[in-house]
Amino acid sequence: MDLVFIYGPPAAGKLTVAMELEKLTGYVVFHNHISDDLALKFFARGTDQYSALSMKVRMDVIEALVRGGVDFIFTSAFVKGYTKEALQLVDGVVKMAEGYGGRVCFVYLTARQAELLRRVDMDSRKGFGKITTHGQLIEHLSSRNEPKEPPITGSLKVDNTEKGPKEVAEEIVRHFGLKNRKQMSTIA
């Protein structure tokens, strides 16, 4: 079981790359806004209740996929930055996956700030509760001090300022030696 964990700043193209990676590998995409948007139905963003529900849903789905041996792609932007708690969450996900014989392939996706600003108000971002204005993005980036290097050891760092999503997905496949699960199931 492979879990491809794509993380980085808002508007870096995490979901777009994940969708391309899904096409290449047959892995299922579980993006963070699935749990976030569910929590927003009941609680205001930033409240303890919102955070707790979003995290519970996220971890329950990840555990179900890991236990079921499902290869999947997860996307995340750590809302409060790369805090000790966020990195402990990552450690928990790794232990869970490895406990069931799986592996986690971390991808730190980033782009130059000018490119993030160009992308932030694209229509594709509006279907979810994503940051969609220049002001929100600048505030978010300045409050988080987005790192220059991946904060999770062993991450593949990809700056996609000048790379398309398919090119990035192909790079991820090569780097981690991912297989196309759709082709494998038709061969077996």
Image (spheres, rainbow, N blue to C red):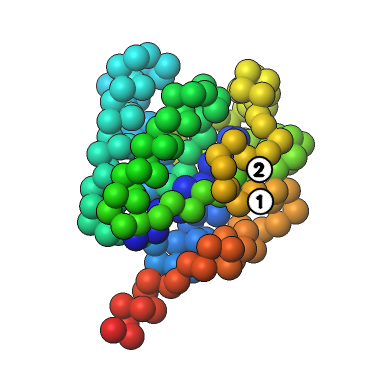
**Viewer-proximal residue among 129 and 97:** 97
Quadrant location of the C terminus in the rendered image? bottom left
Q: Does residue 75 appear left or right of residue 152 in this picture?
A: left
**Which residue is at 34% across, 14% downward?**
48
For residue 110, which numbered disc appears in the image?
2
Q: Earlier in the sequence, mark 2 or mark 1?
A: 2
Q: Does residue 53 appear left or right of residue 2 in this picture?
A: left
Vertical placement of residue 165 versus 146, above or below? below
**Viewer-proximal residue among 129 and 159:** 159
Question: Circle 1 sits in a helix, a strand or a loop, which is it?
Answer: strand
Count of numbered tags: 2
Whole-percent x and y of residue 69? 27, 59
Quadrant location of the N terminus in the rendered image? bottom left
| Residue at mark 2 to residue at mark 1: CA–CA distance | 6 Å
Q: Given the image, on which type of amino acid does mark 2 rest?
A: Thr
- Tell me, yes or no, if residue 41 can be seen here: no
Q: Residue tagged by mark 1? A: 158
Other residues around mark 1 within 10 Å, as few (<14) / some (14–19) / many (≥20):
some
Whole-percent x and y of residue 46? 42, 16
**Which residue is at 45% across, 62% downward?**
22
Whole-percent x and y of residue 156? 60, 52
Q: Quadrant of residue 12?
A: top right
Vertical placement of residue 174 versus 18, above or below? below
Q: Given the image, on which type of amino acid does mark 1 rest?
A: Val
Vertical placement of residue 150 versus 159, above or below? above
Whole-percent x and y of residue 3? 40, 53
Q: Does residue 159 appear left or right of residue 106 in this picture?
A: right
Cβ–Cβ under 8 Å for marks 2 and 1: yes
Question: Circle 2 sits in a helix, a strand or a loop, which is it?
Answer: strand
**Which residue is at 68% across, 39% downward?**
149
**Which residue is at 52% across, 23% downward?**
83
